[in-house]
Image (cartoon, rainbow, N blue to C red):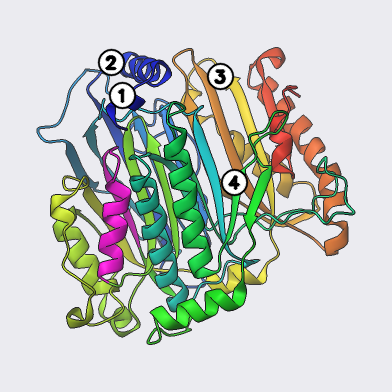
Amino acid sequence: MPDGARSHPALAGVAARAASAGSPAVLFNVVHFGARTTTAPQSQLTGISPPTARDKPATETLVVNLAGIGFRVHTWAPDVPSKPEGTVDAKWVPPMTPVINDRGITREVYGGAVVTNPGFLYDSAQSVELLITLSHKRWKPTFADSLMISTIYHQVTSAALAGEGTPILFLQSPAAPFKDAPPSVRQDGSGENPRLTNGMALRMLVGLDEARPDARLELLRGVAAVAAEHGLGLQVADRRFGRVRGEWWTVTHPHAQTYRLRRAALFPWATSEIPSSVQLLTFVGPARVGSSAAIASDLVTRNIGILAISEAVLQETAFINIVVPVAPARRAEQVAAGSCRPIVEGLGKVASDCGLTRRQEVRGRSVIGDSPATDYRVLATGPLTVRIEESAKRRDRAVWISWDLPLPPGGDKGRLDVAQLVLTQLLSSGKVAHARVDYYRSWVSPSGRVHGNAKIAVLLDGVKDDKVGEELSTLCPWTQREVISQLVRQRIALRTIKLRVVWRERWLGRTNAA
């Protein structure tokens, strides 16, 4: 943010985070996981213990799991204060066991250290959350759609940068789309239908300076212009008194015909084939305003599509996780492998594998070497198999969970996994045919409490669409009670446990514990 944004809450937050870290740099692990074939089982990787430091809980954890592929990110402070020679030190971590096991699962681990950026100031309480919807249908992007997602990502990150340099704190796509209830339904949310876990939507959280309302308006005008140009839906988190997260104010609805015409006009040469082979990319470096826009601009310039993205700031360190489709002409040429490169070299290699046009047809020269992301590293794994068709056939519904509880006593601190407990309990109910942890975010406070939230994709067994909400209304409270009982058996005091398992996101805003 500019100097005018360095208000007391942001400075206090930075000071508190720096004091708790005790080091000018943070350590990190990034795990890329997926499958080589469509018959390999899907991997489930959650938990707050880093692969290279299993005896301790990570300070912050992010997990994304989608269509048989995903990312797992951990950050924590070193025991002895230290910093790398440059701003980023990243490397591939040799596996203790074969990288590809006998079931066809690929798992690449990367580790290193990043010098935190004390100039990246934000107050998470002062922010605006946006939901941009391409379609309310299930996530099933084609090569042409991937180029549209790249374009939209570039334009909304550029709009955030233009809005007085507002920082992007979180960005996720695909995401659960939201439909307004019809006028005949009560406005307290009781008429809301269960939401699809993943639709053609992008959700983002942007930090703002409350002393600069003009920056907020400029951001919203810029994003609204992008939505109108491409026929997208736009919803803004409803921050009015009495409203909670998960309630949205609709600005525009998606317009399918405008989107199709815009896609055809921008990418008439792009195929409507659904990608089956992808690379997983993680861009890592000190959190800086403008780094997202710089990376997005380079991807658009090189005609690299985006199927999914998960961007987050963990301990003042930016992690931009992207799933990009491998170009059809180069699918047979590659062997699954992991690499760690400087951003200029890394993006050049990605472009040669995943650029959807010939080198002579790119839309401009890369300037990533002279941008806020110039010292970032690119961690790349692939090609891996993505199961978009299989994922789109299931009508998975979203179950939301949040928790706040102390770490268990003794040596189990790194193994506490609330999301996995909830997942296991759901599957044991006899009513769930399939479930997976779709999104997972947790952080450990200096006082030793674990805070987290997650989204679980649930497919009920033999339940009609009009009965899903009724069934989930019974299943979620039962799961919540059973998981709390398990936590108590792990010697965590009942009075200290706060857990919510709900199928309406807005219900996470309730304050009662059990």
The answer to which of marks 4 and 1 sits earlier in the sequence is 1
Q: Residue at 65% x, 39% y: name it.
A: 238
Q: Is residue 467 left or right of residue 367?
A: right
Q: Amino acid at mark 1?
A: Ala
- Residue at the extreme front: 214
Judging by the rendered image, the residue that carries numbered circle 4 is 236
Whole-angstrom CA distance, mark 2 to mark 4, is 37 Å
Would you say the residues marked 2 and 3 are in contact, meaning their CB atoms lie under 8 Å apart?
no
Which quarter shows the N terminus? top left
Numbered disc 2: secondary structure: loop
Label 3, secondary structure: give it.
loop
Question: Earlier along the polypeptide chain: callout 1 or callout 2?
Answer: 2
Query: Which residue: 66% across, 37% down?
Result: 401
The residue pinned by badge 2 equals: 22
Q: Is residue 285 magenta?
A: yes
- Disc 2 to disc 3, C-alpha distance: 23 Å
- Crowdedness near tag 3: few (<14), some (14–19) or many (≥20) residues, C-alpha within 10 Å: many
Cα distance, mark 4 to mark 3? 38 Å
* Amino acid type at image mark 3: Pro
Between residue 124 and residue 393, name the one nearer to us: 124
